[in-house]
Image (cartoon, rainbow, N blue to C red):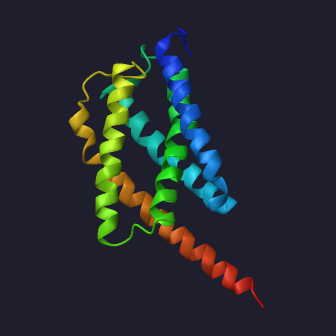
Amino acid sequence: MNVTFDWNEWFSILSALTFFGLFFIIRKYFPLVMVIIIWIYNLAFVATIDYFLIASPFKLYIFGDNPSYELSGGLFHFLIYPSASLIFLFVYDKFELYGKKTGWYILVWTGFALFFEWLCVINHALTYKGWKLYYSIPTYPIASIMLITLFRFTKKKLHKLSLQKSP
């Protein structure tokens, strides 16, 4: 790992602390097993996509400001993405944004995600090598739908398990 500690690392650290801090506030809303499932899902899903797009032959973007794996990439994969996903699910479930509201919520969240991605680019936490910001427009809604589907499935199974344990 080749790290030159400059603003992009600070931006990544501050972003990770912000997202993880927000998650820390709402963490008790979810059962621990739900947090673990969502966290592992994010590590597998997002990292797989990122590594696929970062690796040869595509090399569409890099985390940080050099092609080797940097601290910023680790912070995104291990803290920012999972924390942001749980915050997304918290708002979705807490405010019951079901049905048609889900579509609007995904649209708003996509706007936020695009804005944050743009911030990452201008702060050099993410460097495009062939990727364009507008390529991400369909990515966020698809990822949101998959995340909501996993959440609803897991919530249903956990509820069913709790009913089976009740006398």
- Image vertical order of residue 2 relative to residue 57, above or below: above
Give the residue displayed 28% in from the left and 21% down from the top. Answer: 129
- Image vertical order of residue 166 relative to residue 88, above or below: below
Q: Answer with left or right where residue 96 lies relative to residue 40.
A: left
- Image vertical order of residue 114 relative to residue 102, above or below: above
Q: Answer with left or right where residue 57 lies relative to residue 125.
A: left
Count the labels in the image.
0
Give the residue displayed 59% in from the left and 57% down from the top. Answer: 37
Q: Quadrant of the C terminus?
A: bottom right
Q: Is residue 67 visible?
A: yes
Give the residue displayed 30% in from the left and 44% down from the top. Answer: 111
Q: Residue furthest right?
A: 167
- Image vertical order of residue 96 relative to residue 36, above or below: below
Q: Quadrant of residue 79?
A: top right
Q: Quadrant of residue 50?
A: top left
Seen from the viewer's position, the closer of residues 58 and 5 is 5
Q: Residue 116: where, in percent of width, then height? A: 37, 34
Q: Quadrant of the N terminus?
A: top right
Q: Residue 161: where, in percent of width, then height? A: 66, 79
Give the residue displayed 58% in from the left and 75% down from the top. Answer: 157
Q: Is residue 69 visible?
A: no
Q: Residue furthest front?
A: 95
Q: Residue 127: where, in percent of width, then height? A: 35, 21
